[in-house]
Image: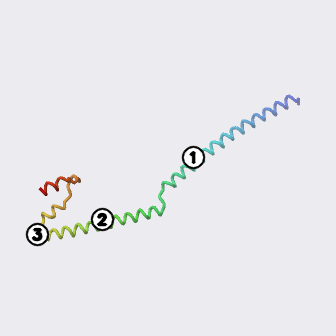
């Protein structure tokens, strides 16, 4: 074997190794990027999911709202019974009905006073 033949083979193997190392490096970079993306996605999904403490506090708030609604319903029932027994009777009960528009007109009170 001649020195040029050996030198050519060494050069060729070195180039092949360089290409292989470059390809492996690119693959490692891609895998690191995917890993970073997955970690970010996992972190975001953990932040979005409510904790058990948060769920418990929401359940407590829900129970408090139900209790308040029940109390209001009982209060309205008591008011209706009291007004039904009042001398004005059904006319007083009609005054409890809400305005269908849901808006209160402050001028109504002025017109009634006049």
Residue at position x 33%, y 67% from top? 67
Q: Is residue 4 left or right of residue 49?
A: right
Sequence-wise, the earlier of marks 3 and 2 is 2
Q: Which mark is residue 71?
A: none
Pointer 2: what residue? 69
Describe the element under mark 1 as helix, strand or loop.
helix
Viewer-closest of 10 and 113: 113
Mark 2, mark 1: which one is toward the viewer? 2
The image position of residue 25, as x and y in percent, is 68, 41
Describe the element under mark 2 as helix, strand or loop.
helix
Sequence-wise, the earlier of marks 2 and 1 is 1
| Quarter of image, res 106 | bottom left
Residue at position x 82%, y 34% from top? 10
Is the C-beta separation of discs 3 and 1 under 8 Å?
no
What separation in Å lies between label 3 and label 1 (alpha carbons)?
Answer: 74 Å
| Quarter of image, res 96 | bottom left
Q: Is residue 32 left or right of residue 70?
A: right
State the colouring used for the structure image: rainbow
Label 1 crowd bin: few (<14), some (14–19), many (20+), radius 10 Å: few
Is the C-beta separation of discs 3 and 2 under 8 Å?
no
The image position of residue 83, as x and y in percent, is 16, 68
Q: Is residue 99 left or right of residue 29?
A: left
Q: Which mark is residue 37?
A: 1
What separation in Å lies between label 3 and label 2 (alpha carbons)?
Answer: 29 Å
Q: Which mark is residue 87?
A: 3
Numbered disc total: 3
């Amino acid at each position: 074997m001649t020195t040029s033949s050996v030198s050519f083979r060494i050069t060729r193997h070195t180039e092949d190794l360089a290409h292989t190392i470059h390809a492996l490096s690119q693959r490692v970079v891609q895998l690191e990027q995917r890993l970073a993306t997955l970690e970010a996605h996992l972190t975001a999904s953990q932040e979005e999911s409510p904790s058990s403490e948060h769920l418990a506090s929401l359940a407590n708030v829900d129970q408090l709202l139900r209790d308040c609604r029940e109390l209001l319903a009982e209060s309205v029932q008591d008011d209706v019974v009291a007004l039904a027994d009042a001398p004005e009777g059904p006319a007083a009960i009609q005054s409890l009905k809400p305005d269908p528009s849901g808006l209160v007109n402050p001028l109504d009170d002025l017109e009634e006073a006049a």
